[in-house]
Amino acid sequence: MIDTPAASTARGGRRRGGFFAVILLVGLAIVLAGVFPFRQMIAQQRLVDNTQAELNALVGANEDLLAQIDAVQSEAELERIAREQYGMARPGETIYVVELEDSGGVGGVIESEPTLDSRSLLERFWDFLTGRDLVPDG
């Protein structure tokens, strides 16, 4: 078989096309191998941040409770709590309770309808890449 210039350029074009396809597949594999661990790392950092914020809130609540414990140590505070929360009175005092009429509203729990995700496809894709779908902000 005689090698013509047209036949050699067709083979060269196929070789280059195959080479670019292999390079594209290798590049895609590298990107995917990097995205998923990166996504997990960002999600774990977000989880650490959320947990730290929760810890800070609990420390603040603990300080408030310690302040309440200190306040309860006084006789006046104990009497105020006994009167307000438990309806207690000193001997000889009369307690009057005023009951208000019901407003006529229907009691019970109001169920809310499930909300649809109003974010765009691009926002949801970005949340996927950054791992926000694994650990929501909180």
Image (cartoon, helix red, strand yellow):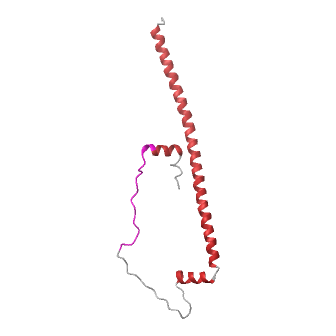
Residue 52, image x, y percentages: 61, 56
Residue 20, image x, y percentages: 51, 24
The image quarter in which residue 57 lies: bottom right
In the image, the segment drawn in magenta is 105-122
Residue 3, image x, y percentages: 48, 7
Nearest the viewer among 97 and 16 is 97
Nearest the viewer among 41 and 93 is 93
Q: Residue at x 59, y 66 (%)?
A: 61
Q: In this rendering, is residue 47 above or below 27?
A: below
The image quarter in which residue 70 lies: bottom right
Q: Main secondary structure of the magenta part?
A: loop
- In the rendered image, the residue lying farthest to the top is 2
Residue 108, image x, y percentages: 40, 71
Q: In this rendering, is residue 49 above or below 19?
A: below
Q: In this rendering, is residue 101 above or below 133?
A: below
Q: Residue at x 46, y 88 (%)?
A: 96
Q: In this rendering, is residue 134 above or below 84?
A: above
With 20 as the anchor, is 72 left or right in this view? right
Residue 64 part of the magenta segment: no
Q: Residue at x 61, y 69 (%)?
A: 64
Q: Residue at x 55, y 44 (%)?
A: 39
Residue 111 part of the magenta segment: yes
